[in-house]
Amino acid sequence: MKQKPDLIFWKLWNLSFGFFGVQIAYALQSANISRIFATLGADPHDLSFFWILPPLMGIIVQPIIGAASDKTWCRFGRRIPYLFIGATAAVIVMCLLPNAGSFGMAVSTAMIFGLISLMFLDTSINMAMQPFKMLVGDMVNEKQKGLAYSIQSFLCNAGSLVGYLFPIIFTAIGISNIAPDGVVPDSVIYSFYIGAAILILCVIYTTLKVKEWNPQEYAEYNGLAEQPKEEEKSESMLKLLVKAPKAFWTVGLVQFFCWAAFMFMWTYTNGTVAANAFNAPVVDGVLQVASPEYQAAGNWVGVLFAVQAIGSVIWAVVIPQFKNHKIAYSVSLILGGIGFISTYYIHDQYLLFISFLLIGAAWAAMLALPFTILTNALTGVGHMGTYLGLFNGTICAPQIIAAALGGVVLSAIGNAENGAPDQACMLLLAGVLLIIGAFVVSIIKEKK
């Protein structure tokens, strides 16, 4: 097997630059989906059900994209065609989703329109996101993978920072942050428009700058036969799972606790901040989502998520200083768990910055370390794209479970005195889950 060459920094950068635009789209979705559907009229106990769609589409789409791209060779490359198609579809849907309440439809019809748009947005984002992880696995040697995924983590968090701040920036320059009942404010709608434009420009940049290896080069650098045996071509995903290295399963178990925790964060931070830090009004046990306080809290959630992204960027620089990946992973998750737990007790909007800086440490580790450990374990195994697509199931499955059970758990632990659900309890639970995940890291067996 030929040794993969060291790549200069800018080649590593170009491999992941389009991820900046993809992550803006993902950040806009993460920070605003609960706000959008609450504005359309969703009950807090039902909010988690809307969040089933993103991971559900991911668990379906990403293994398919991984397996299909493993078998794709064309003039545009192996992974890049899927990246470009996914990004183009995402741009179209980003212009439709925030307008779900603006077309004069009944509440139920607007909800259905929003759900369909969300389904297509998640499908396209997943289609655009997966190729970046595969490109690093394909073209970067083991020595540089940590750096490559750290660059990807940096660009991911930088994109998140931009996407999270768009609504409050647009509000600051005079675009309305309030709207009639059932209508999403213009500050959110314009954020999606600008995010869509940046996404397609970033993906075009990566498409023009990255030249994937041809089949012969790929086979030589990855220790594979240029023409796989017929039985290898036809191996089912189930057979590949049976043959997966132990790192696939042990890291996947840690992922369960991490991604369930973050699903609770994305679903319930809006309600938590509105009630605890902005004193949004409650009438007959119902948080008033059309109130200026709730919509101001929605903007502030974007700021808090941006603080999380800043914390993640800072911590991404610290992670490579650890000599042991597992220690870095555990410490990061414990810091994130403390951050989540603290949100339950903090009622000042500015002190919440501390909480979300700590949460950012966990996010940085979740973006970089699992893929570093896994792709090192997969070197020389083949089916890299398929395995990475299947590994996405360890990200999506816990989110689906958390979303499906979120309303039940909220009813069980989130009873507030004023009758409105105490959504802060769900962030407290998220912190406990991260700390459990930190202890589970000890069972991971790394390939040395």
Image (cartoon, helix red, strand yellow):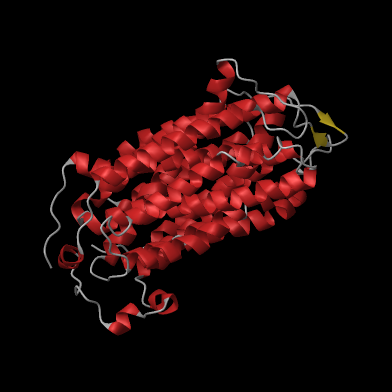
- Quarter of the rendering occupied by the N terminus: bottom left
- Identify which residue, 274 or 21, lies in the foreground: 21
- Residue 156 seen: no
- Residue 193 seen: yes
Residue at the image point whose x is 65% and y is 37% from the top: 99
- Identify which residue, 128 or 361, lies in the foreground: 128
Q: Which residue lies furthest to the right in this view?
A: 284
Vertical placement of 371 versus 233: above or below?
above
Residue at the image point whose x is 31% and y is 80% from the top: 232
Residue at the image point whose x is 49% and y is 48% from the top: 89
- Quarter of the rendering occupied by the C terminus: bottom left
Residue at the image point whose x is 28% and y is 51% from the top: 324
Q: Position of residue 113 (x, y in %)?
A: 68, 47
Does residue 263 appear left or right of residue 7 in this picture? right
Vertical placement of 148 versus 160: above or below?
below
Q: Where is residue 348 in the image (x, y as percent from the top left)?
A: 62, 23
Does residue 266 appear left or right of residue 22 in this picture? right
Q: Position of residue 309 (x, y in %)?
A: 44, 34
- Identify which residue, 62 or 330, lies in the foreground: 62
Vertical placement of 353 versus 52: above or below?
above
